[in-house]
Each structure stands twice: as C-alpha cells, then as structure tokens.
Image (cartoon, helix red, strand yellow):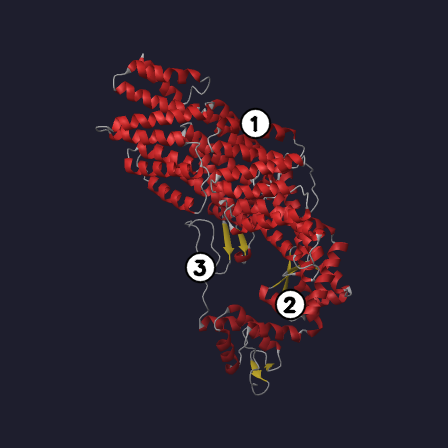
Amino acid sequence: MARAAAEPEAVDLITDLLSLPASHPAPEPSPQQRKEKTLAALLAQVDGLAQEQPVLILFEDLHWIDPTSLELLTAIVDRVQRLPVLLLATARPEFMPPWPSHAHVTALSLTRLSRRECVALVEQITGGKVLPDEILEQILARTDGVALFIEELTKTVIEGDMLIDMGDRYTMAGPLPSLAIPTTLHDSLMARLDRLAPVKEVAQIAACIGRDFDYDLLAAVSGMPEDGLRSALEALRHAELVIPRGLSGELFSFKHALVRDAAYAGLLKSRRVQLHAAIARAIEQSFAHLVETEPETLAHHLTEAGLPEKAAGYWLRAGKIAASRYANIETIAHMRRGIEAVRRFPSGATNDRLELDLQFVLGPCLIATQGVRSNAYAATVTRARELCERLGDTPEYPHVIQWSAYMHFVRAELPQALDGFTAALGLAEAAENRPAAVNAMRTVGATLLFMGRLVEGRRMLERSLAEFDMCDEAESLATRATAWDAGVAGNLQLSWTLWALGYPDMARARMGVALQRAEAIGHPHTEAYGAYYASVLHAFCRAPAVAHAHAERCLALSEEHGFELWRNRSRAVRRICANQFDPSSDSLAAVSGELAEFVGTGYQISSTALYALLSQAFLARRQLMSAREIVGKGLATAEQTSERFLEAELLRQKARALVIEGGPGVLTDAQKLLEESRALAQSQKARSLELRAAADLARLHRDQGRYAEARELLTPVYSWFTEGFDTPDLQEAKALLEELG
C-alpha cells in the first residue's frame, strides 16, 4: 500500500501518535487494539514507501529503546527481508536483540579505528587540509581510535587559536603549549562550548530540556528575543553541536548524547534547579498537550527542580496512562519515580494517600512482569498494607489483603490462602466495596477448586460472576487491583471446575465466554492467562490439537510482553501436546526438567495439572519410570499443599502404570489404587475423574472375565452424564459398555 492510499483510520492513528487531532473521528478502540492497529499502520507505511523506491531506515542507540518501539523494530526486522529496505541500527554491546538470527540480518562489531582510518577521518573534518605532524600525532595518541573523540578533538584544535589556516594546510601559530589539547572527550566538548560563549547558555538551557528539544519551549524558558535565539541556534548548528529534526525546522537534537551531557554538566547545581523549575512552569502554562499526553516529561522537570510534591502527582498520572496502554515496564518505572518523590517530603495523611495510589498501580504490573514470588511484589504488598492501616478505612484495603493472600496461593499454601481471601471478602462486604468483593469471591472460589472442594468452588465462582455482571465498575477491574480481568478469570476457573464436575460442554462454553471477553478487552496479560487455562482445559478434554493452539497463543503473548509465569507453563503444555502429534518428538524429558526448575522457584499452584498431563504423556509412550516419577511428585505436592483437585487422576495414573507393567500381585495393587481414585472422585463430586477411574476399573474386571461386575460398575457413572458425548472419555466409556453387553 503506497502512502497516498493510507486508510483514514491509519492516518488518525499516526496523528494521535504525534499528539495531533484526528481528522476522521471513529469509535475508540481498546488500548491494546489501538496499539496493534498503530503498529500495523506504521508497518504499512514501510510497505508503501518500499513500493515507491528503496528505503533506508535508521534506528540509533537501541540500548535506550522503550519496549513498544522495540516491538515495532522487531516487526520491521522480520518484514524487511521481503522488501527493498536497508535497516541500520546502532547499539552499545550490552543490548541484546530480541529477534532470532535471521539470514538477512548482519551484526557488525565496531572496534576502535586503525591509524589509517583515524588519519582519513581527521582529513575529512579538516576538509583535506593537512595538519602539522605534532598536532596530528597528539590527536591520534589521545583519541585512541574512538571516532567521536577524533571528530570533537580535531574540531577543538582547528577552531582554537593554535593554528593558522594557509588555504591548503594548517601551520602552527607558535610553539605547541603543554596540555593545549584537551585530554578527555568531556574536556574537548566543554572547550568548544566555552569558545561559543555567547550561545553557550542556550545550549545549556536546551540540555536541561533534553537531548531533543522544541524551539517554542526553549524560547519560553530562555526569554530571549527571537532574532537572538535563532542566531544562537544557528551558531550551534554550524558548530555541529545541534542538528535540526523534522520538516518544521522547530525541532532540534544534540548531535550526540555526550554533547548534551557536557553542556548539562557545565551548569552549577543551583542553576540546573532554576532551569528545570522554569521548564516545568512553561510546560504547565503554555504546553497543555504535553501535560495531557506526556506527564512524565513535566514530572521529570519537577523532580529535578526539587519539587517532589508536584512531581509525584504527575508520575502517578504518567503511570496510569502507561498502564491503560498495558505498557507494564514504563508503568513500573513511572511509579517508582513517583514513590521516590513522595519519600522526599514529610510524611502525613496526604502523602500517604498519594503513595498508596502509586503502590496500587504498581502492584498489578509487578504481578504481570515479575510475578507474585518476586521481592519487589512482596515489598509493594507490605508497604501498601502499612499505608492502608495507617490511613484507615481505605477502599484499597480488601484488595491489599487479597494481594497478601495471593502470595500464599501461588505457593499452593491453600489453607492460608483461603483464610486470607475469606478475610478480604469479609472486609469488602462490610465496606460494601463490590469490586473488591468480586475479586475476593473469585479467589475464594479458585482456592476451593484447587483444594478439590468443587461444589463450594463452583458456588462461589458463580456468585462472583453474578456480582461482576451487576458491578458498575466491571470494566475497571481489568487492571485496577489485579493483573487480569475479573470476569475473564472467573469464567476460566469456573470452566475447570465444571469440567471436573462432569459438565464438559458447559466448561467449554464458559471458556469461550472468557476468551471472547479477553479478546474484546485487549488486555495482554488477561489474554495470556485465558490462553493458558484454555490449553489445559482442552488437554483435560483430550483435544491436543486445540490445546496446542491455545498454548502457542499464550507463549507468543508471554514472549512479547515478558510474562514469565505463563511462558514457562504454556511451553510445557505445548510440548506435551506436540508429543501426541509427532511420535518422534523427544521433548517430554525437557518438560520434566523445566517443570522441576519452575516449581523450585516457588510457583506451586496448579502444578498438579501439569504433573497429570505430563505423566499421562509418559504413560502413552510406556515410559513407566518417568511416569512414576512424575506421578510421585504430583501426589507429594497434593499432600504437602492441599492441592487435591487432580489427586484422583494421579492415583488412577499410578494404577495405570502398574497395569501396563503387569506381573504377579500387581493387578491387585492397581485395583486398590483405582478404587481409592474412584472413592476420592466421588467424595469431590468430580464426575469426570470418577468416570476415568471407573472405566479403568471396569477394564481390569473385563480382563479378569468379570463382565457383569464391570458393567454394573461403569453403567451408573456413564448414565449420570447429560453432555460431553463427543469427548474421548465418554466415547470410550460408551464403547466399553457396548463391549460388555
């Protein structure tokens, strides 16, 4: 698509990116949809330009790149292999590119220049005029092959008063004084700025604004007449210290970050404070669009001006904007700057309230990116609870109690988690705080699910979803107090509960509702959460192709957004399912190792689901030793953590390994295990698991010639079901009953 053919929506997305008014008003998409459409519009521009002519794209200083820009660059890297495009990107050695090693990508390590290259660069800067040997030798000796240093030092020399321009060469104006040539790059840059004394102050004011600066803001802060300011900028441009950017001619950048740093370092600290305060005043008074779209810019200048009270409020506003775009890394950075600012002024109720607001935005982002087991999350929970208790009667308090209980939940310390979530629910209901109550009901229900108390769990999850549907603040629950949407999460956990209770169709329907809502919201962490739960549900239903597709989706989202929890788990489910497609695959051992490593970090919750799926895969391959090891770990986890949701299934698999092995006395042990599995499933009302245990026990009776007993055992269990007749479990049970007559 050529540029002229850009769709109106694409034009509006790009103008919005530039903080310009939209020309074609349209329904507002969700933040995630806006992000995806904006990236697509920018990629379409690359396509269009490349159809017109070969294109050169430059990305500089990738070591400072923000996550969203890196996402765009990664997409461009993949796209240009099919286009007449040359993409050049520079970065320091510590930058690690996230894209794989493509054949069309070449990495060049830029080392120090050789002597010949250094001389050539000097000649280019002098315009071919020859320098005296002693000057050239000092330049080469002191710059050590660093290109920027060579450039700056050569300019310092020829702009000074130690040389005479003879037209085609330079000669010495006198004896070379000792240490006349600056010995460091900073000294060289400062020397050049000092020789531009009339415009040095303009460079320093611009340096306070940033590496990139706008003429109008510079004019507002400097207070200089337009002619004088334009002249100063032209002098800086002529000295190649600043360069114009864009088509308007009103945007400028320092040629290099080190130039900006040198100008900034030349200011007294008191003067820096004055200038940052002046910049902040100018932004507040005359640049409303910056206040609305880039409050972090104002927050930065207020912070540097020593005005932390005002700065903290703008850091909070910046963090909320970043959070609304699901930019977790940026949100965390803004919140931490805000918290740092709050702690620089005296404590009190107002300050505590502001810090709690900051901590409350920070918490869900830490869950999504670093996980509940991280020290950062624990510190945030502790501090938020302290602030709530100090302030008293805050609407956040039930949420924070729930955060604290969630740390027990992920370790599968389920009795402690249940106590905490129940306490949070009591607080929320007492305060008539429906959003907090909705989340607390859901977490109580989820805990009951994993404890194997399925009927109670279902009741609480359905109550949570009913309250959610009536909640005026339902939309805000996506990121307000958790890292996922409460409506999506409730349906996900209810789907697992319904499957275990013997309602596979209802379970899949609930899963469909959850995934549709997740897609409509466009909240990446919620989408990854949903894709993982969907992958496991369909693996439970023995639909590996569907499970594999959802695991792939979860993994892609997790790789893109850094969701470590879902990345590890989705990779495990994907590999387990792949083994059912590809008999030659040998990834189960890798899954076993990764699962052990992951559980070793403290993330225990729902690990029994992965143990059950993995051991089933080992049994299908008749790898009995590995299957027994995994079943043993799963049963030990159930005993240690009270996560008894799939204990009956693990007992059945332990019996299955004995049946496959065969031998004297083994079948008796297998029968006892199957009876134990069936009894446990019955006590939990886990009809899906009861059906599996009953079917295996019926097969055992059949193989012993006890047909009537087998039929009497399986018939009532199968007859209980009213749905799910397309699932392998029910189809195999039906076939077994027909065989038994």
Q: Position of residue 430 (x, y in %)?
A: 66, 35
Amino acid type indicated by mark 2? Tyr
Task: State the residue lying farthest toward the bottom.
Answer: 175
Which residue in the protein does label 2 denote?
264
- Direction from residue 543 to residue 654 in the image, left or right: left
Q: Position of residue 414 (x, y in %)?
A: 49, 38
CB under 8 Å between discs 1 and 2: no
Query: In whole angstroms, how far apart are the C-alphas of marks 1 and 2?
Result: 60 Å
Amino acid type indicated by mark 1? Glu
Indicate the secondary structure of the residue bearing disc 1.
helix
Q: Is residue 429 visible?
A: yes
Amino acid type indicated by mark 3? Leu
The earlier-in-sequence mark between 1 and 2 is 2
Which residue in the protein does label 1 denote?
462
Which residue in the protein does label 3 denote?
108
Examine the rendered structure and indicate whether residue 542 appears above or below residue 123: above
Q: Residue at x 55, y 71 (%)?
A: 151
Q: Residue at x 32, y 32 (%)?
A: 654
Task: State the residue lying farthest toward the top.
Answer: 741
Indicate the secondary structure of the residue bearing disc 2.
helix
- For the N terminus, the image quarter is top right
The earlier-in-sequence mark between 1 and 3 is 3
Q: Quadrant of residue 270?
A: bottom right
